[in-house]
Image (spheres, rainbow, N blue to C red):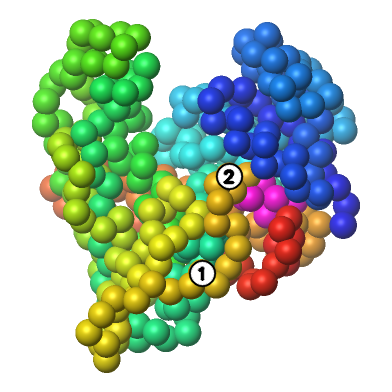
Amino acid sequence: MKKVNIGIIGCGNISGIYFENLRMFSAVHVTACADLDLDRAQARAEEFGIPKGCTVAELLADPQIELVVNLTIPAAHSQVCLEVLEAGKHVYVEKPLAVTREEGQAILAKAKEKGLLVGSAPDTFLGGGIQTCIKLIEDGWIGTPVAATAFMMSRGHEHWHPDPEFYYAKGGGPLFDMGPYYLTALIAMLGPIKRVAGMAKISNPERMITSKKKFGQVIPVETPTHVAGVLDFHSGVVGTMITSFDVFGDSHLPWIEIYGSQGTINVPDPNSFGGPVLLKRHDSPDWKEIPLSHGYTANSRGIGVLDMVYALNGSRINRVNGELGYHVLEAMHAFHDSSEQDRYYMMKSTCERPMPMPQHLPFGVLD
């Protein structure tokens, strides 16, 4: 299999796990990393044994690099993705694909024009936990799926994050922060979404930072902090989803549950790769923990990049693709639009349900 040279743009906190994991995959070679802060790029290069820490312009001009991983902040996702594609390189971007639908459409259009691939995190659904749930559904353990629930309930980030302002600015909030994990997992298990009904509110117009760095600073809230709604899937499943930064205490609600005609699956945290996976069938009084059927159960962020490399080497589409990323982006906006316009939002995009992962794969092998 042909090894693909990769560059990484954005050397902040999230980059560490990508550097760590990508260097363990024999099919990829990270040859350069770049950041607006050149010193930070060079420090990451030294830390992880990357041949070159450089400027963004230098990385994009490198003819040896075929694929770029975009780990910049969400506000920069679109601009950087377009620059990468214009430079003739495939791009994989952290979630979300972009901030606005127009930006997301522009990325997909540019990739089509250039004949290049786009990938968009999260790739957690490729892990053993959710892949086990997919297998249970496909093998009929819960019969026909009829409904689903998804809950992301927290008090927000101002009590621990050193710079939490972004989470309460436009383009932030619980839905855009954590929604991609939940929506991507639901689509991977149940297929694309047909329509959305949403309600969204700003519960408090201001938040006080209580983390150490900016303790006592008050920040305005510009985006909904509690978003609830209903998802109507093309498969006929009706899903209920809540994302919130307004909940104190540890919620007892499940992350995700899938309800079928013959049983229920309790799905593990979609922001993780492992289990546990719990199954309750109609013919059993008890929940049972199901052994995971697939690998990649540790923090495997970057496996979506490896999946792109396999797609480049073969004839299939990458599982963590741009169409999936855009469908998730549109669905998040759909909650807000439905709430603001007091009507159902009919989805304009669709996507293929990602191809399940094969079982019993050696580490670093996806097909």
The image position of residue 110, as x and y in percent, is 64, 39
Q: Quadrant of the N terminus?
A: bottom right
Amino acid at pointer 2: Arg
Q: Quadrant of the C terminus?
A: bottom right
Numbered label attached to residue 292: 1
Q: What's the residue at 43%, 74% (across, down)?
A: 290
Q: What's the residue at 60%, 63% (across, down)?
A: 295
Give the number of the mark in front: 1 or 2.
Answer: 1
Which residues lie in the magenta part? 303-309
The image position of residue 348, as x and y in percent, is 39, 55
Numbered label attached to residue 143: none
Kindly report the secondary structure that dominates the magenta region of the rendered protein.
helix
Q: Secondary structure at mark 2?
A: loop
Of residues 270 and 173, the one nearer the viewer is: 270
Amino acid at pointer 1: Leu
Classify 10 Å Cα crowding around label 1: few (below 14), some (14-19), many (20 and above).
some
Residue 360 visible, this orientation: yes
Quadrant location of residue 164? top left
For mark 2, what is the residue?
301
Disc 1 + disc 2, Cβ < 8 Å: no
The image position of residue 24, as x and y in percent, is 74, 45
Of residues 342 and 161, the one nearer the viewer is: 161
Q: Is residue 280 magenta?
A: no
Q: Is residue 306 magenta?
A: yes
Whole-angstrom CA distance, mark 1 to mark 2, is 18 Å
Closer to the chain start, of discs 1 and 2, is 1
Quadrant location of residue 310? bottom right
Residue 5, relative to residue 345: is it above or below? above
Q: What's the residue at 63%, 50% (across, down)?
A: 303
